[in-house]
Structures are given as structure tokens and as C-alpha cells.
Image (spheres, rainbow, N blue to C red):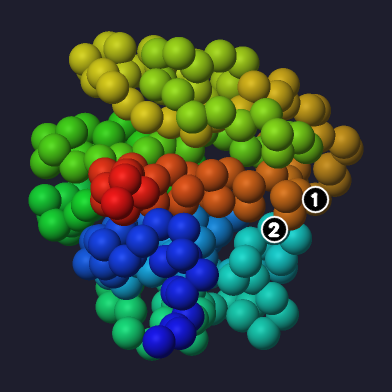
Amino acid sequence: MLNQFSRTELLIGKEALEILNKCHVAIFGIGGVGGYVVEALVRSGVQNIDLIDNDTVSLTNINRQIIASHSSLGKFKVDVMKERILDINPKAKVNTYKCFYLPETKNLFDFSQYDYVVDAIDTVSGKLQLISQAKEANCRIISCMGTGNKLDPTKFEIADISQTSVCPLARVMRQECKKRGLTNVKVLYSKEKALKPLDNNDEENVPGSTAFVPSVAGLIIASEIVKELTQEAMLKCREK
């Protein structure tokens, strides 16, 4: 019988799709990258999702964030994303947390319940704590490095943090992970050299961004998660 995931099942198989239905993924940061991670995961069959973000939709989000529109201005991003998820798949179970992830809020989350964690937040301290907490719980995690001030979505690569280059945020994270003994840290980063923003009279030190760079980053992350969670089941299906 045809259903909304029939086309996906044709490629990955029934067993892999069932794995996605049952897995539990937490996305920290529902912005330009995180929103597209959620979108792709839900459309791939992931039904158990935690959304963590304390921000509201602003006018300057509209150029790149999938949840941002004039009708959603001022609303909490996690609420808008949840509504969108349930419109795509009414069977989904969505937990929302209106808070920013910081070392001070880490105890709100039990990482042992997650099959995968996505770090799409901006602060170095939060990123390091997310990675540490995931490692302690033996939970898979992928961390997104900088996407601001970039125009080329083809320059993204997935690598261990120790193998990154060019990206300034990745450099800081590489150094801090080494100090803390954090190894085998999977990240998405760009080898494109960041551009210098043009004159900005309204705000200082705000990075420029586009519709196509953070969105591609989010889709690549979602693809990596689906692949990692279902790879064994897909191989078995293909061998039959």
C-alpha cells in the first residue's frame, strides 16, 4: 500500500524505514541549519524528535530559515517547527524545550534516550558540553561548524574534528577538544574561506548568510544521520 514514505522505502527498504520510525533524535538549535536537519529527517521517516531552542523568529531569519515567514514572526522557533512536523507527519512525537543549551542547562537532557544528537548551536562552550555529554552517554553526535559569511555550498565536508582546516570555528573547536581529550568527534565544516561582510550600519559583527549555504549544511547532516542509522539494514536489503 502506498504511503508518504513509499518512495524512500524503494531506496532503503522496509527494515531501514522502520529503524527511522523508531529512532529518537535531538536537534539543538532550530535555525538555518537545524531547521533543515529536522525537515529532512521528518520527511525521511524519523518520528521521535526533541527540539531545543529559546529563540523566536525574527525578520532577518526569513532569508534562510525554513520556519521563518511573515506569519511566524515573533513565535518560538520550536513551536513553529513542531507545527510543521505534525503537518508533515501527524504520527510524529515532538518534545519542545524553550531554552538555550548551556553547561548550566545540561541536566535537563538525558542523552541515553537519544539515538543521535545534532549540534546546530553557535556557542563554543555549548558545543563542547554537548559533545562531552554525548560521549558520556555513548550517544552519536554530529556538530556543525560555521556557515556564516559563505556562498559556496559545495565546499562542505564531513570529517573528524582533528582533520578540519580553514574554518575558524573548527580551529577553535579542534584546540578545545584536544585540551579536553575529546576524540572521534564528527563534524560538518566548510573549506570555503569566509568572506568579509559588506558595510553594515545596523548591526556589528553579524555574519552574512544565504538561503543555500545553511540549508545544504542541514541536508548533509540529515543525510549522514539517516545513512549511519540505517546502513546495516540497507546493506542486508540490497544483498537479498
Q: Is residue 215 above or below residue 207?
A: below
Q: Is residue 172 above or below residue 23?
A: above
- Could you tell me residue 152's position as x and y percent? 76, 35
Q: Quadrant of residue 24?
A: bottom left
Give me the disc on residue 232.
none
Residue at position x 58%, y 77% from top? 74
Can see residue 222? yes
- Could you tell me residue 65's position as x and y percent? 63, 62
Front position in the image: 34 or 107: 34
Q: Is residue 161 above or below residue 222?
A: above
Question: Which residue is label 1 attached to?
Answer: 202
Question: Which residue is label 2 attached to?
Answer: 64
Q: Earlier in the sequence, mark 1 or mark 2?
A: 2
Name the side, left or right, on which 103 lies relative to 223: left
Residue at position x 72%, y 21% from top? 193
Front position in the image: 231 or 208: 231
Can see residue 118? no
Kind of element beneath mark 2: loop
Q: CA distance from mark 1 to mark 2?
A: 19 Å
Q: Amino acid at mark 1?
A: Asp
Q: Quadrant of residue 159?
A: top left
Q: Could you classify mark 2 by the number of other residues whose Cα lies within 10 Å: few (under 14), some (14-19), or many (20 or more)?
A: many
